């Protein structure tokens, strides 16, 4: 009986340790640099190791951008949700992408962000989440 209890304790301890190891968000992500354009697919993470910042593209929350087929002036916007980690905190930000513009300018604290979301909508076609790419340039 003691043998089974010792085995059960060892098994539980092992499970707890493995869970702790695999649930840590030490995912390094794609190494990126300030001032250089990079792209993320949904679920991907980029790491600015020199800044101690990681960005993870979570989802396109909504996409109401009109197709740029020349029939109408493109309106609407897409909202991209991005998780931001730095040495002090973790937060989620929403980055709007206006219809008809190639790039959108914004800020992340003291950093400047230039972003664009592809693909652009086309008449009669639906964009699958796996097809989205968020292009980002971050500078100080």
Image (spheres, rainbow, N blue to C red):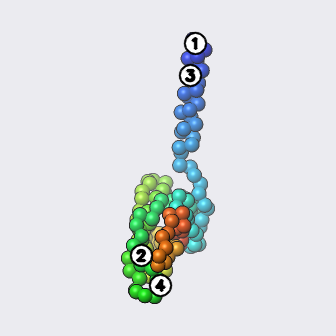
User: Helix or strand or loop: what does disc 2 sit on?
Assistant: loop
Q: Nearer the viewer, residue 110 or 18?
A: 18
Mark 3 is surrounded, within 10 Å at the Cα level, by few (under 14), some (14 to 19) or many (20 or more) other residues, namely few
Find the distance from the CA under tag 4 to the CA under tag 3: 64 Å
Disc on the earlier residue, 3 or 2: 3
Mark 2 is surrounded, within 10 Å at the Cα level, by few (under 14), some (14 to 19) or many (20 or more) other residues, namely some
Residue, disc 3: 8
Disc on the earlier residue, 4 or 3: 3
Residue, disc 1: 2
Disc on the earlier residue, 4 or 1: 1
Please identify the quarter of the rendering in which residue 15 is found: top right
User: Helix or strand or loop: what does disc 1 sit on?
Assistant: helix
User: Helix or strand or loop: what does disc 4 sit on?
Assistant: loop
Disc on the earlier residue, 2 or 1: 1
Q: Residue at x 59, y 24 (%)?
A: 10
Q: Residue at x 58, y 16 (%)?
A: 4
State whether residue 84 appears in this view: no
Mark 4 is surrounded, within 10 Å at the Cα level, by few (under 14), some (14 to 19) or many (20 or more) other residues, namely few
Find the distance from the CA under tag 3 to the CA under tag 1: 10 Å
Q: Nearer the viewer, residue 78 or 25?
A: 78
Nearer the observer: mark 4 or 1; the answer is 4
User: Helix or strand or loop: what does disc 3 sit on?
Assistant: helix
Nearer the observer: mark 4 or 3; the answer is 4
Q: Nearer the viewer, residue 36 or 43?
A: 43
Residue, disc 4: 69
Disc on the earlier residue, 3 or 1: 1
Find the distance from the CA under tag 4 to the CA under tag 1: 74 Å
Q: Nearer the viewer, residue 59 or 111?
A: 59
State whether residue 39 appears in this view: yes
């Amino acid at each position: 009986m003691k043998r089974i209890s010792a085995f059960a304790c060892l098994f539980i301890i092992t499970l707890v340790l493995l869970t702790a190891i695999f649930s840590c968000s030490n995912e390094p992500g794609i190494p990126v640099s300030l001032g250089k354009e990079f792209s993320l697919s949904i679920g991907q993470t980029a790491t600015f190791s020199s800044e101690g910042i990681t960005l993870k593209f979570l989802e396109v929350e909504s996409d109401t951008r009109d197709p740029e087929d020349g029939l109408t002036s493109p309106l609407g916007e897409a909202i991209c949700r991005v998780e931001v980690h730095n040495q002090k905190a973790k937060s989620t930000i929403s980055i709007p992408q206006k219809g008809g513009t190639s790039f959108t300018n914004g800020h992340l604290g003291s950093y400047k962000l230039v972003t664009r979301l592809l693909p652009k909508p086309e008449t009669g076609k639906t964009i699958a989440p796996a097809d989205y790419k968020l292009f980002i340039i971050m500078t100080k």
